Image (cartoon, rainbow, N blue to C red):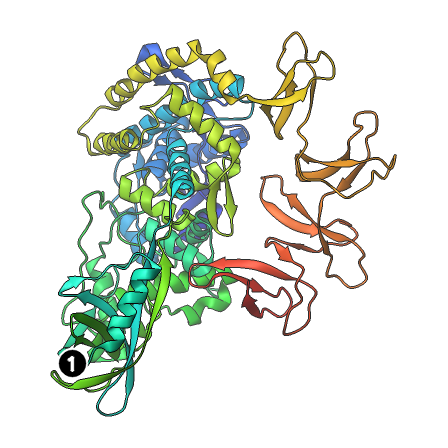
Amino acid sequence: MVSRPKSLVIVESPAKAKTINRFLGSGYVVKASMGHVRDLPETKLGVDIEKNFKPNYVIIKGKRKTVKALKEAASKADAIYLAPDMDREGEAIAWHLANLIDRGGKKIRRVIFNEITEEAIKEAFAHPTQIDMRKVDAQQARRILDRLVGYLVSPLLWRVVYRRTSAGRVQSVALRLICEREDEIASFVPKEYWTIDGLFRAADGKEFGATLEKHNGKKIEIDDAETARKVLEEVRRQCYIISRVEKKRKKRNPKPPYITSTLQQDAARRLGFSARKTMLIAQELYEGVDLGEKERVGLITYMRTDSVRIADTALQAAASFIKENFGDQYTPPKPRRYARSKASQDAHEAIRPTDVARKPQDVEHYLTPDQAKLYRLIWERFVASQMAPAQFDVTTIEIEGGPYLFKTTGSVRVFDGYQRIYPDKEEKEVTLPAVEAKQPVDLLDAQSKRHETQPPPRYTEASLIKVLEDKGIGRPSTYATIVSTVLERKYVDRVRGSLVPTELGRTVLRILLTAFPDIFDVGFTARMEEELDRVESGEDDWVSVVREFYEPFRESLEKAQAMKAELRRSVEEPTDIKCEVCGSPMVKKWGRHGQFLACSAFPTCKNTKPLEEESPVDAKCPECGGEMIVRTGKFGKFLACRRYPECKGTRPYTLGIKCPREGCNGEITERRTKKGRVFYGCQNYPKCDFATWDRPVAEPCPECSYPIMVVKTSRDKGSYLKCPSCGSEAKS
């Protein structure tokens, strides 16, 4: 019996292949390409600048077996369908696959779907299309632009800083934003100001507070303690009456469903997820999860999108669900449609559950804890976006006394609306007494309070992604990579949730801005993103866009090459330390493990030595009993004998905090993972495996007496202490 030829379907991942295979049946074979199969070569530029920037694509290392297997499957198939994701990267993967597969005269079709459900998959295969070369050209232009910058600028950094530094076209702009924010904070001069609060008693005896707002009809500004004292004295002498009472019913509408950037921002704030982690989990939810023996389905729609648009069928399903589960009062008279932003490409729907009836509590036992958290976040945001507004009774009271006017506002929620499932703010209800205009009130007390203006906050992952989106830097598919890249390159550290530039990051940025002031400009980079969008829309030719970028870039590169010596000197920091070999001054230079000391007479004298930290260390060398100093290695700080290399004694650099594990006599030390992330662990590892990501403090837990607590930071709570054992919290 001769077996009937089957259609071949190629997707990116095995998880996606497994889900789609459930829906297509026995007439299809679904294979995974495991992502991209071709790319520019790793070891050379791979772009022929003289021939219209023609790329030289090669099969990615480790993918030859995959490509061979796909070719064999294609030769046996009667039809070939390419079904990678629906963004530029997915279209490029499809194009590369089409170029590698031996067609044998067979037609290759492209299938596109926004969600991995049976209905969506069958609809996509019923109406296949062709590869969109405009998307391919846009992705190719971006890839070539990034390669030109990375492979032509990075060698300059190697010669000026050290071998492993590198530049990225968009990541370097993100680094610039982080550094500029740090400069704003450093140069910020706080300004003193004072406020005055009064405690009043109404005619019915109820007390309420109000804040001084105006003096002689103008907004009052109090800049110093003496003025505050004089105003306070005058305020206390006045007699007060209610001058105005205003009552309003206000509505608060829900936020739109998630797009990529807002999902990453909310997942960071509410769940503590990094942008990369959010996208990895969202990809899993999109590609499909087993929900029992017979059902495997994608739980959310495509997660790389900048559109708040929702399909009509999903709007209707949401309205029916809300009416059935919450009642008519929670169901708006017509579906909510949110306005798109001017910068939105509006290519895909917003991120939503594929089936609104699939409640988080119904599927959470099939998911990992992180998958369950993210699915609940997406589900609640979508359902809330289609619910009735929350309603509040807002009362404003103004109180006059002589030339002074106090004001207070109370708010009471009278209908929860969408906040029933998605409380987007911590509402503190304030109930004011029932008063009327012209009624007298008594001032019971008045107090002044000193304040200082605050510097702008450091960027978090969430706030950096928001500003990147606002400024038009990057696109939904690139935000997570932009942030993770500056962290992995050690140009930025994550400190208590905030992004702080390292000295290495500042040094690299200073060189880039000196040599390439235009290329790494925020406005220039945003315009390049717009030009890539025009390539995708068919308005511009990709070669012209790349050439327009390359010509000024080449001129800047030539100038930078001519000033290498000057740039190298600019990153060398002179010191008062003399070289013990030739007597010349030593300078600070950069190496793979940070800064070190090198003789300024290089290359005549090649003496180098580790950079010693200035803080004294009360520790003796275990080998010779001599003095020890702090040095920095691949995995962070450690103590080394000052007599190195004569004596090679070392000890861990500890925080002076005893390990909390019972029976362990070690101390906690700061360490780094292979990727550079700081963590804290016992110096007796591997005998003791105690470790924590959060910085410990030698303060016992007030609840369970655990020997240490760790420092945590959140947007709502600020900095606080948490017990690693019982989870109780305390003020830091």
Quarter of the image with the C terminus in it: bottom right
Provide residue 536's location: percent of width, then percent of height: 24, 33
Image position of 493 with respect to 648: above or below: below
Q: Residue at x 38, y 41 (%)?
A: 184
Disc 1 residue type? Answer: Ile
Q: Left or right? Give the position of 434 relative to 228.
A: left
Image position of 295 with respect to 437: above or below: above
- The front one of 345 and 640 is 640
* Residues packed near mark 1 inside 10 Å, few (<14), some (14 to 19) or many (20 plus): many
Image position of 246 with respect to 191: above or below: below
Residue assigned mark 1: 242
Q: Residue at x 70, y 65 (%)?
A: 707
Image position of 166 with respect to 563: above or below: below
- The front one of 699 and 494 is 699
Provide residue 168's location: percent of width, then percent of height: 42, 29
Identify the secondary structure beneath mark 1. strand
Residue 573 visible in the shown view: yes
Which residue of the protein is positioned furthest toward the bottom in this rendering? 204
Q: Residue at x 50, y 35 (%)?
A: 491
Which residue of the protein is positioned furthest toward the top in this rendering? 604
Residue 150 figure quarter: top left
Residue 413 figure quarter: bottom left
Q: Residue at x 83, y 25 (%)?
A: 646
Provide residue 459's location: percent of width, then percent of height: 40, 46
Residue 359 figure quarter: bottom left
- The front one of 43 and 572 is 572
Q: Left or right? Give the position of 61 relative to 378.
A: right
Provide residue 469's location: percent of width, then percent of height: 30, 44
